[in-house]
Amino acid sequence: MHLAYPAVLAVLLFCTGLYGVLARRNAILVLMSVELMLNAVNLNLVAFDVWLRDTLHAGQALTLFTIAIAAAEIGIGLAIVLLVYRNRGTSDVDRLTDLAERPGTGLPEAGEPAEKKAEAAA
């Protein structure tokens, strides 16, 4: 088996996931993009394990460990996204400003997001 085919596919998957993390604003799409990146890493691990003919199959064992970590990550991530959506009404990562710092003070914001404060003041 040529190593170039799975390596090129893994690079394409990883780049697609990276674009999704950087360009998307929906938290669920960001989580899906992270999963794409992890799957690209898994593909590389299995491809190099087969190419190196490892008798212990360390690449495949590490892939199983990565899949377990990814399953836990998606479970916790979806729970957080659902709670944020239930409380805020949006899963847009740019509009979630509760943990953002106020400009110039270094202190965290308290209470409602800045958009609601501006509407209440007007």
Image: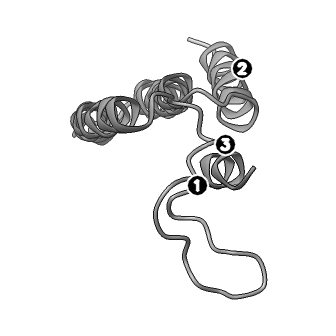
Q: Quadrant of residue 85?
A: top left
The structure residue drawn at horizontal position 67% and vertical position 47%, both measured from the top left corner, is 115
Q: Tell me which label, 1 or 2, sits earlier in the chain.
A: 2
Q: Which residue is mark 2?
A: 12
- Residue nearest the viewer, comparing 94 with 68: 94
Q: Amino acid at mark 1?
A: Thr
SS under mark 3: loop
User: Which color scheme does this rendered protein use?
Assistant: one colour
Q: Tell me which label, 2 or 3, sits earlier in the chain.
A: 2
The structure residue drawn at horizontal position 61% and vertical position 47%, both measured from the top left corner, is 116
Rendered image: mark on residue 94: 3
**Which percent across, then down, holds residue 61?**
23, 37
- Contact between marks 2 and 3 (CB within 8 A): the answer is no
Above or below, 87 relative to 118 = above
- Contact between marks 1 and 3 (CB within 8 A): the answer is no
**Which percent across, then down, holds residue 101?**
63, 73
**Alpha-carbon distance for marks 2 and 3?**
27 Å
Q: Which residue is mark 1?
A: 97
- How many residues crowd mark 2 within 10 Å: few (<14), some (14–19), many (20+)? some
Q: Amino acid at mark 2?
A: Leu
SS under mark 2: helix
**Which percent across, then down, holds residue 77?**
34, 38
